[in-house]
Structures are given as C-alpha cells and as structure tokens.
C-alpha cells in the first residue's frame, strides 16, 4: 500500500542554485530565494535537482544547499522540502538520500540513473534499493528521458508504486501523454503524479495529476502557484487563460539548456548573479532578448523596477 502523503500536492519549485562570482554557492542568496518562493505561495521546495545544477555540486555543497533550504522552510508554516538525491550510482543515491533524511528533508526526489541506461528491471531495482534504505521517508521517482537517456516505463512506475510503500509519487517529464495516462489510470490509491513540464501541467491536472515541479516558478512563484491551484480547483476557464499567458515563459526557459535561460531571467529580475559552472555557459544574446521581451509582457520587469524604487 502506498504511503499517504497529504501535503504532496500543488506547485513545487525546482530551485536554482545561486553561485557567487568565484563559483562558490551563495548561501545568503539561496535563503532569500527560498523565502521569496514561500511568500509567493509555493510551499514545496526542491533543491539539488536538474535546475539546481546538482551534477556539478560537490557532496559537501549538495548537503549545504539542502540544509539551507530546510532551515529557511522551517521558519514558515506548511513549507516542505523534497531534496534531490539522485545519482547514476545506486550506492551514492542511497548515501545522498540518507544524508537528506538526517538533515530533516520531508521527502527525496530520485532521478533515473543517467548514462548507465539500465533496463526496466535495473530501474526497478535501483529505486527499490534507495527507497528501502530510507523506509520512513517518502520518495518521488523522477522520469526525464531527455536528460537520462532512459525512460521509466508506466509498468515499472506502477510496479514500484504497488511494491514499495514509501515510493509515493512520480515526477513525469517524459512528455509522453500516453505513458502518463497509463500511470494515472493504473496508479494505486494515494500515489501522486506530478508534472515535470510546466507547459503540460494544465492538461496533466485535467487528466488527474496532482501538481507540478516547476522551473518557471523560480521567476514567478505567484503566477505558477495560482495556475496550479486554479487547475486543481477545477476553475478551468481561469486556469486556461493563465496557462496561455504563461506559456511563452514556459517555452523560453528551454530554448537553451536549462537552467541557462531561467538564471538569465532571474538576473534581469535582480534575484541573483548569473553565474554557472562549466559545461554550462551564459545564454546567447538572442535568447536574452527574448527573455526580456517575455518578462516585460508578463509585467515582471516592471514589478521588479517598482520594488527597487520603493
């Protein structure tokens, strides 16, 4: 039986990791970003995922980012932390998951092993081993074939949901609605399905999904959390109008490798310094121009200017 996790619903943010000009993690800025998310209505924080450039964080930095996120979240009622703890080594994923548990995370997000390209049986064994190593902590499995070169088939996700009590949800970023519908149709009671693509959030919730883990909410937590809340409440006309208003932002965030565009946008909003770790580099000028146009159309640049002049 799947563990019941009532709070795992709505808009979560896949947090960027801010770096200083010397390449170190900017802990003060990270705390401010978490607090901004909560002020904007987001109650689920996801550090150390793809958007957080986890692949270039050291183990020590990984733990720092998770700890700072937890500390900031604990100061606000109802905020929860789903720590990214994935690895293409099962032993390492177990170690990261246990560290997140010990730091006080409310759940972990475990991406499918990248580069190894395991079979479906290998994926099953990997996720089961990680979940059983932290049996008291909820686990969200993460399917993103475009990053990992392997796909968690619907049958495998459902098998894990039925066999492992603390595997409580899947973040689905395959873009395959047929596969997603198979999971939604066959899932056991209490198993949650979260969109991993901002642009598919509305159709997925219409089909029965429970929320999303968002990139665009880094830029506008208020609007993305509102979109999710409207859809979950069945306010389809309002949700549809907001979806189409936000769609250009959802799309522009991925015209270059993420989190390049979202960090560039956040720099324009004076939220962080636009620093990356190689092999990621700053976005091209045409991307920057399009980002500025989209942010202006949404009124976000004007809001930031008004706050700066207040």
Image: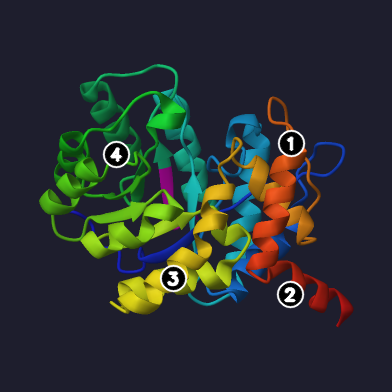
User: What's the CA distance linking mark 4 and mark 3?
Assistant: 35 Å
Q: CA distance from mark 2 to mark 1?
A: 25 Å
Quickly name the residue at label 3: 227
Among numbered discs 3 and 2, the one appearing first in the sequence: 3
Q: Quarter-wise, where is residue 51 in the image?
A: top right
Q: Give the CA distance from mark 3 to mark 2.
A: 19 Å
Q: Measured from the top left, where is residue 267 in percent x and y?
A: 77, 54
Q: Please give the residue where the numbered disc 2 appears in the rendered image.
A: 303
The numbered disc on residue 284 is 1
Can residue 106 be found in the magenta stretch?
A: yes
Observer-side mark, 3 or 1, equals 1
Q: Pointer 4: residues within 10 angstroms few (<14), some, or many (20+)?
A: some
Q: Would residue 72 appear left or right of 19 to someone viewing this image?
A: left
Q: Earlier in the sequence, mark 2 or mark 1?
A: 1
Between disc 4 and disc 3, the foreground one is 3
Magenta residues (range):
105-109
Inter-mark Cα distance, 4 to 1: 44 Å
Disc 4: which residue = 132
């Amino acid at each position: 039986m799947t563990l019941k996790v009532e709070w795992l619903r709505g808009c979560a943010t896949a947090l960027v990791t801010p770096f200083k000009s010397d390449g170190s993690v900017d802990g003060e800025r990270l705390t401010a970003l978490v607090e901004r998310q909560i002020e904007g209505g987001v109650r689920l924080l996801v550090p150390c995922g793809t958007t957080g450039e986890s692949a270039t964080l050291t183990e020590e930095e990984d733990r720092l980012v998770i700890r700072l996120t937890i500390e900031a979240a604990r100061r606000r009622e109802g905020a929860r932390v789903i720590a990214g703890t994935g690895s293409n080594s099962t032993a390492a994923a177990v170690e990261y998951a246990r560290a997140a548990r010990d730091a006080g995370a409310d759940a972990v997000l475990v991406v499918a092993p990248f580069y190894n390209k395991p079979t479906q049986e290998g994926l099953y064994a990997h996720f089961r081993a990680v979940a059983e190593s932290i049996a008291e902590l909820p686990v969200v499995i993460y399917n993103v074939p475009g990053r990992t070169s392997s796909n968690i088939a619907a049958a495998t996700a459902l098998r894990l949901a039925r066999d492992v009590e603390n595997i409580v949800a899947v973040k689905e970023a395959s873009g395959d609605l047929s596969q997603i519908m198979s999971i939604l149709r066959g899932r056991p009671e209490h198993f949650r399905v979260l969109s991993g693509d901002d642009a598919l959030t509305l159709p997925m919730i219409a089909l029965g999904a429970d929320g999303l883990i968002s990139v665009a909410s880094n830029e506008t937590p208020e609007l993305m959390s509102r979109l999710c809340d409207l859809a979950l409440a069945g306010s389809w006309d309002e949700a549809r109008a907001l979806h189409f208003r936000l769609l250009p932002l959802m799309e522009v965030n991925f015209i270059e490798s993420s989190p390049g565009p979202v960090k560039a946008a956040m720099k324009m909003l004076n939220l962080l310094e636009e620093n990356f770790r190689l092999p990621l580099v700053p976005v091209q000028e045409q991307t920057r121009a399009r980002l500025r146009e989209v942010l202006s159309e949404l009124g976000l640049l004007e809001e930031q200017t008004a706050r700066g002049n207040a």
